Amino acid sequence: MKQLPPDTVRLLSSSQVITSVVNVVKELMENSLDAGASSIDVKLENYGLDRIEVRDNGHGIKAEDTAVMAVRHFTSKICSQEDLERLETYGFRGEALGSICAVAEVAVITKTEDDDVSIQYTLNPTGGIVSQKPSHLGQGTTVSVLKLFKNLPVRRQYYSSTKKCKDELKQVQDLLLAYAIIKPDLRLTLVHNKVVVWQKAKVANHRSALVATLGSGTVGNLLPCHHHQEQPEILLEGFFPKPGADFSSTSSSNPDKTFIFVNNRPVHQKDIMKLLRQHYAAQYPDDSARSRYPILMLKVAVPPSSVDVNLTPDKTQVLLHDKEAVLTALEAFLVSLYGYRPPPPGPLQTDQEHGVGRDGGLSTHTDNFLKDAVKANGANAPLGRQTSNSSSSSSIAEDWIVNQTPAGLVCNDQSCSQPAESLEDTTASGLDKNELSAEDWSGGTAVTDPVSGEPLQPVIIFQPSRNNQCDSDEIKNQSNSGKKTFNAITEKRAALTAYDLISNRATRAPLSAAALFEKEARGEVLREKPAASLQDISTAVHERWKNLGEEDRKKYEDKAQKHLELHQQKTKLASEGPGETSTAPPRGQKRKAPPSNQKLLDQLFSAQPQKKSRSPASKPWQPLPCSVPLLRRQLQRLSSQSGASAEPRGLRLVNRLASQSAWVILCGQRLTLLNPFRVEEALLFKRLLEKNILPAARLQDPIQLTDGTLGGAEYKEALCGMEKQSPEPNGVVLFSDPRLVANGFKIQLLPGLSSAERHLEVTAMADYVPFLGVEDLREILTAVVLRKAKTVKECRPLKVTNYLQGEAVRLARQLPTNVSREDVEDTLLRMQRQLGDDIQTCIHGRPFLHRLCDVPSTDRDAEALLKPLQP
């Protein structure tokens, strides 16, 4: 690190002041990103007021730079003010750590690739090093900020309410979201009070980062876009809402999901935000969409020399030197994506400098764009596309202003007929009053028809006439607005219907004779004249009904009479019950159930038990032949076979049941049922008790062990008598006794001048077991002192035992359902060797074996077993 020269310091004088938790997190995160970190963990306690810790795996701070790492205006990122034009890092002032030290207690742990161990530095309010000591952390830098605003009670009072603290935590999460999107290969974690609030893993690209932060449902409505312009060099890319998508799923009521980046730096750019909102809301007629913010990611890339980052202390606002060019390129890009629509009047469109002029037309950026196009094309050339080196991913990115004008059309004034040189001169001098203005262009009066003198219409839609013939009279009649139009809805005849409540269906009113004739004749008219309108069809059908003969008319009248009789019959059946007529109930009274269903209802809801019908017929059965002597001989042959040692205690597998989870086992003359999963559960639990070692997590503050905390002097003596490692160079002795290490305790003995001054402390403890503490260590020492326990199994605390039981159950449930015969035989062998006769139940107290029956040894015993099966 080098100190910046005084002239550069004066140029960078931003009065960097830490005013919030977000400022601290932002400055420390940017330092981590500049150090090439690929993993950053942010941990907060009490919303960051008590502790803020930012840990990364970056390059670390060199040992020769640690003395000035927190001194103001010492930095390794720039050397002079000329480096600001080539700036590629987030930080450059050398004020971040110094400003934080002024309002809090700061400790830095850092290690480079060349260092052997990491060193922890404690800093004073001026950034100087107070103390240093070795640490156990790996490569990277960890900055811990304690007691924020301890010497500023007024500023700390700002966070007295819970709502403000939660808002601050939300701003920290939004800050991490922005860096997670712009850095897809960055792993981020946010922890508050030891609870993971938000985290994001390393992903491949920006789209995957958006999915990880916003969700797949939101990203599914976003469209990847790209726009590049060479003069001046501007690159626009990102993900924008699809045109016409539902604004409720592609917008938000606040701007926290509108991500704008300038040279990979998250910024708040007011002009760009208003331009994005204007073009996004212009495609929706609903006024409620104009007050929302689009969900998008915009990445603006410009040369470093054309952007000034040293504008505000927090560097969230930048100054673009080619601001007009960037806004013009962005507006052209948005029009190519969403098309141009005259924006409605409102608060977003009243300022010309933010996208749209006061007349409702295009903005001044677009006006300048049009003027340049006219100059570039010359006087006699038609208005066409602007000749530019820009390119866009949209298919209409280059022709969004106007299509090529047909020959013979002239402008409303004579400015289009001037030579290019004179046009440039008059434009430069400002004396040309017939210049093509934005008002004329947006009002549609800039280009006129030379024949009629009327303003040129932008679009004329030609429609083919019927039967592929051009009929001017028919087109003229169609364009007549005074003529009443007809459609299928108004021409459809209404049909009276009634609703049968009993049958739960609609009944249609009977058709008249004319309606029946129209139903058949409409199809004939359509076949003869497919292009006839609905009015023509109705007129033709009416004329045919008038000219219909008496006999044919009589036929339709008879059909109508039959329809009427059938409708009356259905109505009568619906309103009458069997044998009596039921009148409609008065309005407002409950309708009674029909009498026909009353008997069935009485049977269903009767309180008295119904008489049972005759007993069902017995199921057919058939005795199976069984030879007891033959079975006895087979059992004797099995018992005499070799390899009996493979099945302990004479246990032999017979077969598997249909459930595939239990096996029938023969033990001598007794048939039993084996549940192999219960056996595996007990075996797993026994192995975990004996061999499992709980991983210990390092404690931030070691726990001192005294006679009072351990339960007495004899317990402390028993602890000191356990197995230890060789003393370290600093005199610290670590305990290596398996009874302590397996239960998740790491204890060290600190040296002293005398044996009485030597004291013990717990440096690490297992975090897998909930609420594990010193009382569990006392339980281990009780087993050692009172029960003379020598093994790990005998020294397990109750909390650890319960935890291992749960792990054994979890592992047993992960075993495959279909267990092979060889696996079951191996389970039986391990059950005999490891569990013996002492353990015959699983963790839940359920037995391994269930007795089914004894195999009969004589024919008389077999007949006695078969007697209950006979009828």
Image (tube, rainbow, N blue to C red):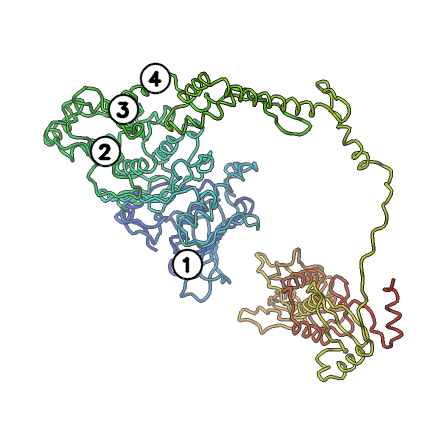
Q: Which residue is mark 2?
A: 403
Q: Residues within 10 Å of mark 2 (few under 14, many from 20)?
A: few
Q: Residues within 10 Å of mark 3 (few under 14, many from 20)?
A: few
Quarter that holds the C terminus: bottom right
Residue 818, numbered circle: none
Distance CA(mark 1)–CA(mark 3) = 83 Å
Which residue is at 24% across, 42% downward? 390
Which residue is at 29% across, 30% downward? 468
Distance CA(mark 1)–CA(mark 4) = 78 Å
Confirm or deny contact between disc 1 and disc 3 (CB under 8 A): no
State the residue lying farthest toward the front. Answer: 551
Between disc 3 and disc 4, the foreground one is 3
Q: Indicate the position of residue 180 as horizontal and vertical percent values.
A: 43, 49
Distance CA(mark 2)–CA(mark 4) = 30 Å
Whether residue 566 is visible: yes
Q: Amino acid at mark 2?
A: Asn
In the picture, measured across the screen, residue 42 lies left or right of residue 738, that is left
Query: Which mark sits nearer the N-terminus, 3 or 4?
Result: 3
Distance CA(mark 2)–CA(mark 1) = 58 Å
Q: Quick one: SS at disc 3?
A: loop
Query: Which mark sits nearer the N-terminus, 2 or 1?
Result: 1
Between disc 2 and disc 4, the foreground one is 4
Q: Which residue is mark 3?
A: 471
Q: Which residue is mark 4?
A: 481
Front-lying residue, 796 or 612: 612
Q: Amino acid at mark 4?
A: Ser
Q: Which residue is mark 1?
A: 60
Q: Quick one: SS at disc 2?
A: loop
Front-lying residue, 144 or 645: 645
Q: Quick one: SS at disc 1?
A: loop
Query: Which mark sits nearer the N-terminus, 2 or 4?
Result: 2
